[in-house]
Structures are given as structure tokens and as C-alpha cells.
Image (cartoon, rainbow, N blue to C red):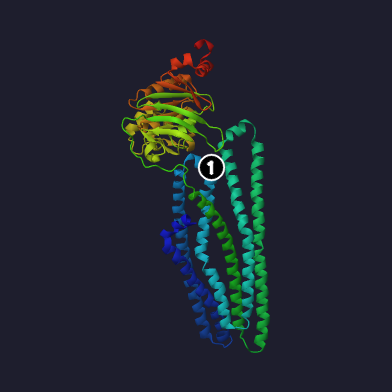
Amino acid sequence: MPKITTFIRGYRKEAVLAPLFKLLEAVFELIVPVLVASLIDEGIAAGDRDHVIRMIILMVVFALTGLLSSVTAQYFAARAAIGFTKGMKSSLFAHISSLPKKDRDRIGTSTLITRLTSDATILQNGINMFLRLFMRSPFIVFGAAIMAFTVDSRIALIFAVVIPLLGLFVYLIMRVTIPMYRKVQSALDRITLRTRENLSGVRVIRAFGREERENELFLSELMSLNDLQIRSGKVSALLNPVSMLVINLSIAAIAAYGRVRYNASLVEVGAIIALVNYMSQILLELIKLANLIVLIARAIASAKRIETVFRLEPSIPDGNEETPVSGSDVVSFSSASLVYREGGEPSLENITFTVGKGEKVGVIGGTGSGKTSLVNLIMRNYAPSSGTVSVLGHDVLDWKVGAMRKHIGLVPQKAVLFRGTIRENMRYGNENATDDDIIEALRKAEAYDFVREKEGFLDYEVEEGGKNFSGGQRQRLSIARALVRKPDLIILDDSSSALDYATEARLRKNIAAMEGVSIISISQRTSSMMTMDKVIVMDGGRISDTGTHEELLRSSAIYREIYRSQYGEESV
């Protein structure tokens, strides 16, 4: 996972110091049983009070020093883990944002959310615990065994049998549970998808009375995740009781064999207690190590899932052009076609038209006729399957996408506002916009009057998704945000559907009065087409007819039918 590992480089010092301080703590822990043995054999048994006091003082000093080392290690480990996650999340979010819409659709929004949240948190916890325990636990396990041999080599042979046995058991448990945790994360993806769909579509669910059905589907997904977690938990749960059984049997063996050795005057009581303490340390550290391996297994699974997103190369590579060609058409389609999925039906086929500087072009057609697909090609969300699409003199595939979009003000079908003030939302269009620029855009978008009435005016807080505004107000604020950008091209993708006819008429009059600005207006309303220099009629992904409003009423059956459906038979 080369991409993931790069984010730890800025925290190399912390990544080294954390395990080193943990090793220092482990050294003090390994010395304590020897001190206890000395306290018993040379102090209590011999009646040497001064020796007992010296050993107690040493143990207190070692305990305090070990505590300080542990706290320092945890500080460095947490700093490295959090810093790593911060850098990784920032880079991952930037990478996702740079992907064309086609690639994001292929991965799935719910999957991307899980990668940025759940997977990132699991990875952070894994790194934190890894830095704290990956050297300490093995060091204490083998260190305790070595120290046991320095106390009594014959009894210590029990350690030589127990440690490999427990190691084998931990390995078998991990081999079974690691694939299970990967399945758990995949099930969590499905839960996230179900939750997101229900929250975004709650009104539709209620309108059709589907609450009970959706609850059943969610419960089914939840039970699937629950079953996976229980199965993996059952296997992991075997670790503690089996480890406890083996260690306790080993302690019993130490006590039994130690009694024999003690009766033969080959070992002292303190030494036997020290050996029992070392075996207890091994038990605790093996349990910690097993839990660490479980956590690391989950972290590795999450890291691989995050790495797959990082490795995803944009299907539409960024170009190099950053400057428009002087005097060129603003938009030019040349025999352009678009197929969203390989082997599927074309959404657009053999599209050819141009939009000149300052020209107002309307696009109209029935549902599924390909109107929004035109926008996707202009914005380079998708690449043409054949033919070319040019913006300001360059093929869209040659443009540096960020530079190209600075010249375009897009107002999408669904008005999207962000949490923050009205001023902050307007500056999404132009971060350097002054209050005068914003007010001018609000006036042109017919939004100034209702914004002026809000408490705080431009400082009025917009709730998440703009829930404290009506649908029409959200659309007008979205249009104002595009106008603040002062673009060469404004694309209105059915962005006035929630407005009444009078407001829409004033809005379009204001926009049409903007000199030198080209407009592509996509709408279902023929009233929106009346002031356009040219109207393109779409049908089944093809251009059916082109002309002015009056020309199309005479020559286009499709346009005439749309007009009649809105104004009646007698209107033509």
C-alpha cells in the first residue's frame, strides 16, 4: 500500500519514539519480578528490613518511571495516528473531488463515505495501537522467557513449550477472523447505502406509505451485518479462555515443579513467585497481542479499501490548456455521442451545434431526450464516446478542468446550498466577490428582495441543504451564485422550475440583458424559449429541430406539441 504509507512520513519521529518509550516501560516491568524475588528471599526470609525497604523504594521508582514512559509513548502514538489520518483524509477527499462524475458513480457514494469515515477511523485506531504494542508485547513475551531462564533454567523449560503453543493458537484464530472482518466492512457499505437512500428519500417513502417495507429492508441488512459480527466475535472470543487455560495450567506446572525443586533446596520461594509473575506477564501480553492483531487485521482491510480509491486513476485525465482561444465559439459540438455504460444505448448521438459569444441558446425536449447529458459533456463530467466537444476554443479533454470551469456558471437541476451564511454560499461562485458583487447578482437573480428581509442580510445562516428557504428561493440563490462568478457561459439546467411565470420572466430578462455572456437554457417550458436566439429541440438523444421560437412553432411537430400541452390547442 505505497500511497497509504506516505502519510506517516511526516511523523517519523513520533512513530519511532512511541515504541521506544514503550520498550523502556517494558524493561522496568521485566525487572520488577526479580526485585520481588530479592525482596522475599534476601529481605523477608533473611529478616533484612533495610533490604526490604530498598526493594520497595526501587519498585515504586520503576513503577513511576514506567508510568511516565507509558504516557509519553501514548502521546507520540496518538500524535502520529491522528496526524496520519488527517493527511490521509485530506488527500483522499481531494482525490475523490478530482474524479469525474463517471468514476464516482462507478464506486458509489455510500462506499466513498464509508472509506472517509469508518475505514479511516479503524485505520487510525490500528496505527495508534500498533505503535504502542507491536514492539512492547513481543518484547515482554520473549523477555519474560529469557528472564525466567536467568531465575531457574529447569522450570523455565515450561515457557519454551507454552509460548510456541499459544503463538500457534493466535495464528489460527487470526487466519479465520481476518477474512470475516473484510466481509463486515462490505456489509457496513450496504448499511450506509440503505441509510443514505432512506434519509434523502424520506418524503417519497412517506408519500407512498413504504415506511414498514423500508424498515424491513434496513433490518435485513442490519441482521446480515449483525450475523457477520457475531460469527467473527465468537471465533475471536475463543482466544481469551484458551489462553487463560494454557497459562493457568502452566502456572500450576510451575508451582508443582517448583515445589519439587524447593524441597530439594534447588530454588527459593521468591524465585518461584518471580516465575509465576513472568508467566502472568506473558498471559497479559499475549491477550493484548491477540487483540492488537485483530485490530491490525481490521485496519489492514480498511487500508486496502482506502488504497483502492487512491489507485483509481481518473477515466478522463486532466489536460494542460488554461487560456481560452480569442474569438472562438463558446461551445461547439461536432458529431458528439455519449454512451454512459459500455454496451448500453447512446444517451446522445451525432450532436452538432455551436454557441457563439453572447448568444442565447435554449434546449427543450421530453424527459430522457438527453438535455442534461449535454451539460455533462460541456462540464467534462463524462467524455464523448465519439466526436468532439469544445469550450472556448479547446477540446474539453485538453482543458485543465479547474481552469475551464472558472469560465462557466452552472445552475444544476437540483438547487444545492451549503450550511453557512448567504455570503459564504455566494462566494462558492467567486471567493473574491465583494458584497456589492453579491448584491448585484442577487438583484439579477430576483433574490435580493427576500434576502434583504432576512435577519442579518448576507450574514443570515443557511441551514444544511437550504432547508430554511423555499424551493424557488433556493433556485434563485443558486442562480445568483453562478452570476457572481461573472462567467463567459451560464448554463441553466431546468433551474427555474419552481418559479412562477412572472418571476421567471423577470429573471430571464435580467440575464438576457447581460452583454457578452453566452447562455444555454435547458427547460421544459416553452415560455423560457421565447427570448432565445436559437432553440434546439431534443428527441431520443438526437437534435430533432433547430430554430427560433416562432420558426419551430411552424416547422417542428415536437415543439408544437410541447407548446400546446402548456398553452392549449387554440394558442398556436
Q: Please state if 254 lies on the left or on the right of 346 as rendered.
A: right
Residue lying at 59% horizontally and 54% vertically, measured from the top left:
182
Near-viewer residue (557 or 562): 557
Q: Secondary structure at mark 1?
A: helix
**Which residue does the numbered mark 1 point to in the structure image?**
106
The percent coordinates of residue 261 (x first, y second) are 65, 86
Near-viewer residue (331 or 1): 331
Q: Is residue 497 visible?
A: yes
> Which amino acid type corresponds to the residue marked 1 in the rendered image?
Arg
Vertically, is 427 above or below 53?
above
Near-viewer residue (530 or 223): 530
The percent coordinates of residue 237 (x first, y second) are 65, 61
Residue lying at 54% horizontally and 57% vertically, measured from the top left:
300
Q: Please state if 139 lies on the left or on the right of 483 as rendered.
A: right
Where residue 317 sits, quadrant-wise, is: top left
Vertically, is 137 above or below 310?
below
Residue lying at 60% horizontally and 58% vertically, measured from the top left:
178
Instruction: Name, please, the residue furthest toward the top.
Output: 570
Vertically, is 455 above or below 136?
above
The percent coordinates of residue 472 (x first, y second) are 47, 27
Instruction: Name, please, the residue furthest toward the bottom.
Output: 265
Vertically, is 265 above or below 338?
below
The percent coordinates of residue 486 (x first, y second) are 35, 32
- The crowd level at tag 1 (other Cα within 10 Å; few <14, some 14-19, many 20+) is few
